Image (cartoon, rainbow, N blue to C red):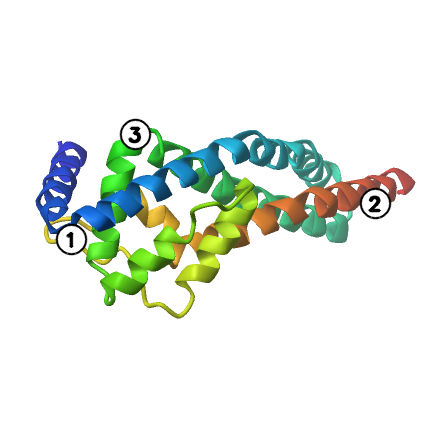
Amino acid sequence: MGIGNTGRRVNAAVGSMAGRVDGHTLEVANHAARVLTLAVRVLRWPTLVVLVLAWPFIAGLAVISVAADDTWLKVVAGVLAVLGGAISAAFGFRRNRILTAVQDEEEFATELGIAVALSDDVGEARLALGQLAGTGGGARVFSRLKGLWRGLGVGPGVLQGANDLPRAKWFFPPKIGTTITLFFAALWVVPVSFVSCLLLAIALAAR
C-alpha cells in the first residue's frame, strides 16, 4: 500500500508541475527524449555484455575464496569477489532503472521539461538540453550530457509531495555522473577479475 501511495503521489506531483512547462521547453524536451531514448536503446546490449562478462570470473574468485586453505588467498579472493560483485550489481541496477525510465517516451519528455522548468536558469537549462540534438552514438550522448550539466546548477529539484522525478532524474546530476562512473568501473571489473581469477587459481593449484 505504501509503494502504491508513493507512486500516486509522484504521478500527481508530476502532473501538477507539468503546467509550468512552456511550449518551447516542451518541444526541446520532446526532442531530447527521442535522442536519449535512442541512446539508451543503442547501449542496451553493449552494457549487458559488459555486465555479464565479469560474472564467471567473479564466481571463480568466490569459489577460490571458499576452497583455499591459505588465509591470504581466501581473503584476497573473497575481497575481490565481493568488490566485483558489488560494482556489477550496482551497475546492473542503474542500467535497469535507466531502461525503465525511457519506456514511456511521452512521460519521459514531460519530466525532462519539468526538470528544466525547476532549474535555477530555465533558459540556460533549456539551451543545454537542446544541444543534445544531432549528437551521435549512445556513449557520446551520455558523456556530452554530463558535460552540459557541469557548472550549470541544473537538476530535477524536489517536487512537493514527491522525492524527485522518477524518469528524468537518471539523466541529471548527480545521477548521470554516477552512471558513467559505474559504467567504467564495471568495464574495469572484467579484466581485473579475469587476471585476478587466473593468478589466484594458479596460486591455489600450486599449493
Q: Image check: 104 left or right of 149? A: left
Q: Image check: 199 left or right of 141? A: right
Residue type marked 2: Leu
Instruction: Determine which residue is flagged by label 3.
Output: 104
Instruction: Look at the image and tell me in which quarter the C terminus lies.
Output: top right
Q: Quadrant of residue 203?
A: top right
User: Is residue 76 positioned above or below 65 on the image?
Assistant: below
Task: Please report the residue visible at 15 percent of the width from the left and 32 percent of the height from the top.
Answer: 4
The reply to whether the C-beta atoms of the residues labelled 2 and 3 are less than 8 Å apart is: no
Residue type marked 3: Asp
The reply to whether the C-beta atoms of the residues labelled 1 and 2 are less than 8 Å apart is: no
Label 3: few (<14), some (14–19) or many (≥20) C-alpha neighbours in 10 Å: few
Camera-nearest residue between 157 and 202: 157
Residue 186 seen in this snapshot = yes
The numbered dot on residue 77 is none
Task: Please report the residue visible at 36 percent of the width from the left and 32 percent of the height from the top.
Answer: 100
> Which element carries disc 1, helix, strand or loop?
loop
Instruction: Determine which residue is flagged by label 2.
Output: 199
**Marks 2 and 3, how far apart in space?**
46 Å
Instruction: Look at the image and tell me in which quarter the N terminus lies.
Output: top left
Instruction: Determine which residue is flagged by label 1.
Output: 159
User: Is residue 66 positioned above or below 28 on the image?
Assistant: above
> Which element carries disc 3, helix, strand or loop?
loop
Task: Please report the residue visible at 43 percent of the width from the left and 53 percent of the height from the top.
Answer: 176
